[in-house]
Image (cartoon, grey):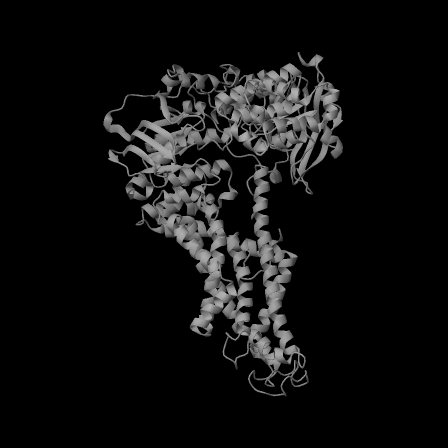
């Protein structure tokens, strides 16, 4: 932000530490155009400090992170500002300089270690490569013999005890081990700055925690300045000292983690925090209406103004200056006099009545369900039951078999044994043998809305297809009417009907997928990780939408997810899967508060949680109570 | 975007529903220099073939000059082996070739994409039977295979078209199968399967519309080959029966008099060459645009933005 620099007084811990990263008014644009992807981004990171760079899709966080390495992706160029790493200006550095700096002074940990490690080279070879590429740095930092240093660096990354690791190929390691190899590689030359780009996104919670602990201990031990890019506030919250929140290419808030979570001062941050589900309490989630502006259509003033409940006409008139609040807390907002007050806490205590249901109320039940993929058994002896108007969540880590379970139930996966009953009737194994009525009553929503909609059909056509298929007697105008009604139900206007999927955002696409399922009035919706590819604020609106629809339409839901926190906000009962077996099941409140199985206990402990201050920072509800209501 | 400067084939009202996938691709291809060049060349040859019969100064079968006489005032391109006017024969001899090539291309592409998509989507024994048949047919060079068919049934125009179209099918099937394999695995196909929609309908309504780009490229390519093969068959004597003018036949008839009146060979040969070059260049433009659109979408994904393709 442009007001920092000399105006900033050293923080409690920052006074003694050198500034290692100094980004000043960085501007990155689409090459050859005047369209800014990132504009006026400024922040500093001191040695030993971990800074979280958070934002939703398209906020520019990765663009900024890569600029720290002196890199811009194809089609982008730096149009202004400076990026100082140590004493080097990365924007104007020559290729030669960059080559020497990367790895030695500033290192990068990519999102997906499986594709970042070379699959045909042994781990040891790849690690040594880094050291061999920088003989000057090895000498200058007295790191000693490369081989000894490799062993040492693996030890630091918590992989010291793994036998034969140096001779292993990447595919022989687990996802967590791969990511720690990537960490070891990044830390091998003792860089002073490290950039981590969503390093735990593909990992399950337990591994994630292990990796995060490794990151923190390494950074603290060696005084490394770390920039941790993430979209997951809960993950970042437990890890970093400072937070920089980005929205539509600008930094909207920057401050110590405790302040940003405890007293968020930008309306966007506040809304974002309210969208994060908590595994500890059952609460309504609040999404953020609308969507971020496309870089070509960003408003003149505050980018968030069109979606902001506190916006004034002045917000849209011109660039909004950065305001400094006490405690090195910078906010780009005109309404800090309102936002500086504590806000009302979020509506809590959703009614999660879990009255025992009578046997005839069971809509879907499965018993002794075992499924295989070729020779591998991925599900064994799974039993579950979903009552009418009930939401059952199935949680599990990657590889637990939860998606296979969903696919068996809806008939997409055929090689399973056991019995599945729907409304009392035994269901045939695959969809092509099921009756029209059975197919209509159970609808499936896919994980990825980017692949589940035909790119060559209009939204209207996509939603109409199942309707025309199951209800051929409807006239064209009746169909049109039902389509527009269901689009309204999922909060999409009638003008969406003539659009194509690639004109829609991820959240809108997922709404279309929900509309497609709802239009034939099913009894049960099977949702397979339907929010996992969406931003947290969009996830919140989708979950709220489902909850509302469930109540309005007396729907039953089977909600498959890896996100334990989300379960608390939507489901009444939960089933925990591990390695293809049900390890625990029961009402959500019971399982979350008093987990019995050791696996569930560990899972609950490892779930990243927002710091407590993040939500109920006080009971006060002033004029900004509106923020809660919207 | 360059759509504004559209000169592509087919009527495109600005108010027409934007973004029919094929229209976007064609319009953009027409705006590339190579696309324009291709269209212009093809347009010239097609105009010659189509308008030629109305412009021909003489009958295409009457002998009006001495055999293989040099160009003169009465015969601008000289005479052929029987003293007929080369210019008139050239002007009359194109449209049959073009019509036959178009028919063969359409047949080959239709047959090939139907079997390619079926093999990709139905998998299992369908895939095996279709693709192994394709392998067997592909073992013969295309011209030899077409010759084989034509020599069995005799050189009727329609049978030639059928034979050439049929010989295209395996090649098209291969390309379409690999493109359809990817599309068949996408979730939107599974979503429709879960409704219990008939497989034939899924292939036609869900998969085929997503194969527009390879389909257009393949059509252009097959058109080129059709022209070459049909002209080749005519050259080898399996075209239309003798008195009829045909660019391919003309090359064969007149090659013995190459030294006396080279124009009788050069002009039809040049027209065939121009036609194939033009179609090829145009197809190349289409292919580039198709890839370019994919790349734009990729850039948008990289920046995590909704795609703006087609809104421009």
Q: Residue A358, how many percent across, how many down?
A: 24, 24
Question: In front: A2, or B93?
Answer: B93
Q: Residue A348, how many percent across, how many down?
A: 43, 19
Asked if one can make out residue A587 in the rendered structure from this viewpoint, the answer is yes
Question: In front: A240, or A367?
Answer: A367
Residue B269, quarter of the rendered image: bottom right
Answer above or below: position of B166 versus A24. below
Instruction: Count the marks.
Output: 0
Q: Residue B63, how many percent across, how many down?
A: 58, 87
* Residue shown at the point (62%, 77%) measured from the top left: B255
Left/right placement of residue B8 relative to residue A384 reads right
Answer above or below: position of A62 versus B262. above
Residue A526, quarter of the rendered image: top left
| Image quadrant occupied by the N terminus of chain A | top right
Asked if one can make out residue A259 in the rendered structure from this viewpoint, the answer is no
* Residue shown at the point (41%, 18%) measured from the top left: A599
Q: Residue A91, how many percent across, how many down?
A: 73, 32
* Residue shown at the point (66%, 12%) measured from the top left: A13
* Residue shown at the point (49%, 43%) measured from the top left: A501
């Amino acid at each position: 932000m442009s007001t920092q620099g000399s105006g900033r007084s050293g923080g409690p811990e920052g006074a003694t530490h050198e500034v290692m990263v100094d980004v000043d008014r960085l501007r990155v644009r689409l090459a050859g155009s005047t369209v800014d992807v990132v504009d006026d981004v400024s922040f500093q990171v001191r040695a030993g400090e971990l800074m979280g760079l958070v934002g939703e899709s398209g906020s520019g966080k990765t663009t900024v992170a890569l600029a720290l390495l002196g890199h811009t992706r194809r089609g982008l160029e730096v149009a202004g500002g400076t990026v100082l790493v140590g004493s080097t200006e990365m924007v104007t550095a020559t290729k030669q300089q960059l080559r020497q700096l990367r790895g030695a002074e500033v290192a990068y940990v990519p999102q997906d270690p499986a594709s970042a490690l070379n699959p045909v080279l042994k781990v040891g070879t790849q690690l040594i490569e880094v050291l061999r590429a920088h003989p000057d740095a090895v000498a200058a930092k007295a790191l000693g013999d490369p081989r000894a240093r490799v062993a040492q660096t693996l030890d630091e990354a918590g992989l010291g005890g793994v036998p034969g690791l140096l001779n292993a190929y990447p595919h022989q390691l687990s996802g967590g081990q791969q990511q720690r190899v990537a960490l070891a590689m990044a830390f091998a030359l003792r860089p002073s700055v490290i950039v981590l780009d969503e390093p735990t996104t593909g990992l399950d919670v337990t591994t994630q925690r292990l990796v995060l602990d490794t990151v923190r201990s390494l950074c603290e031990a060696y005084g490394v300045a770390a920039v941790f890019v993430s979209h997951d506030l809960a993950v970042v919250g437990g890890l970093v000292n400072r937070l920089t929140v980005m929205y539509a290419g600008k930094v909207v808030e920057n401050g110590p983690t405790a302040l940003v979570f405890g007293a968020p001062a930008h309306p966007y941050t506040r809304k974002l925090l309210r969208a994060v589900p908590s595994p500890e309490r059952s609460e309504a989630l609040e999404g953020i209406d609308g969507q971020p502006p496309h870089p070509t259509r960003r408003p003149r003033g505050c980018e968030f103004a069109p979606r902001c409940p506190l916006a004034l006409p002045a917000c849209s008139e011109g660039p909004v200056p950065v305001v400094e609040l006490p405690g090195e807390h910078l906010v780009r907002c005109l309404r800090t006099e309102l936002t500086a007050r504590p806000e009302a806490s979020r509506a809590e205590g959703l009614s999660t009545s879990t009255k025992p249901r009578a046997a005839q109320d069971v809509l879907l039940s499965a018993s002794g369900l075992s499924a295989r993929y070729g020779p591998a058994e991925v599900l064994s002896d799974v039993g579950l039951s979903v009552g009418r108007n009930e939401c059952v969540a199935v949680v599990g880590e990657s590889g637990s078999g939860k998606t296979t379970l969903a696919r068996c139930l809806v008939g997409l996966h055929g090689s399973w044994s056991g019995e599945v009953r729907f409304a009392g009737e035994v269901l045939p194994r695959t969809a092509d043998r099921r009756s029209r009525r059975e197919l209509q009553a159970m609808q499936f929503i896919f994980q990825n809305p980017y692949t589940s909609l035909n790119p060559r059909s209009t939204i209207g056509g996509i939603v109409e297809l199942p309707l025309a298929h199951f209800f051929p007697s409807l006239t064209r105008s009746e169909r049109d009417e039902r389509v527009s009604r269901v689009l309204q139900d999922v909060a999409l206007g009638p003008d969406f009907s003539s659009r194509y999927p690639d004109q829609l955002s991820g959240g809108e696409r997922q709404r279309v997928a929900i509309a497609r399922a709802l239009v034939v009035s099913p009894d049960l919706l099977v949702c397979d990780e339907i929010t996992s590819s969406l931003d947290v604020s969009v996830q919140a609106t989708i979950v709220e939408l489902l909850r509302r629809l469930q109540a309005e339409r007396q729907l039953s839901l089977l909600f498959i997810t890896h996100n334990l926190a989300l379960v608390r906000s939507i489901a009444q009962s939960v089933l925990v899967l591990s390695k293809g077996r049900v390890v625990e099941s029961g009402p959500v409140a019971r399982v979350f508060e008093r987990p019995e199985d050791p696996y569930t206990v560990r899972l609950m402990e490892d779930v990243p949680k927002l710091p407590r201050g993040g939500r109920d920072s006080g009971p006060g509800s002033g004029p900004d109570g509106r923020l809660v209501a919207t | 975007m360059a759509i504004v400067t559209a000169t592509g084939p087919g009527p495109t009202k600005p108010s027409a529903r934007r973004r029919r996938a094929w229209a976007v691709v064609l319009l953009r291809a027409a705006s590339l220099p190579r696309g324009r060049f291709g269209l212009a060349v093809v347009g010239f040859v097609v105009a010659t073939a189509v308008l030629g019969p109305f412009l021909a100064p003489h009958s295409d079968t009457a002998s009006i000059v001495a055999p293989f006489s040099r160009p003169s005032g009465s015969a601008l391109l000289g005479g052929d082996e029987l003293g007929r006017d080369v210019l008139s024969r050239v002007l009359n001899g194109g449209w049959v070739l073009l019509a036959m090539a178009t028919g063969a291309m359409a047949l080959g592409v239709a047959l090939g994409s139907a079997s390619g998509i079926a093999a990709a989507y139905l998998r299992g024994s369908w895939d095996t039977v279709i693709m192994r048949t394709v392998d067997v047919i592909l073992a013969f060079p295309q011209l030899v295979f077409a010759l084989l068919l034509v020599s069995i049934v005799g050189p009727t125009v329609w049978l030639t078209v059928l034979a050439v179209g049929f010989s295209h099918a395996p090649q098209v099937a291969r390309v379409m199968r690999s493109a359809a394999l990817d599309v068949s695995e996408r979730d939107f196909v599974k979503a429709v399967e879960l409704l219990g929609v008939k497989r034939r309908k899924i292939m036609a309504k869900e998969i085929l519309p997503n194969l527009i780009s390879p389909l257009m490229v393949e059509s252009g390519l097959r058109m080129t080959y059709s022209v070459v093969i049909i002209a080749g068959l005519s050259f080898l004597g399996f075209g239309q029966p003798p008195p009829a003018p045909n660019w391919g036949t003309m090359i064969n008839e007149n090659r013995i008099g190459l030294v006396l009146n080279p124009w009788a060979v050069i002009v039809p040969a040049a027209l065939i060459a121009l036609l194939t070059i033009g179609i090829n260049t145009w197809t190349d433009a289409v292919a580039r645009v198709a890839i370019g659109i994919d790349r734009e979408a990729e850039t948008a994904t990289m920046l995590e933005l909704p795609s703006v393709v087609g809104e421009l």
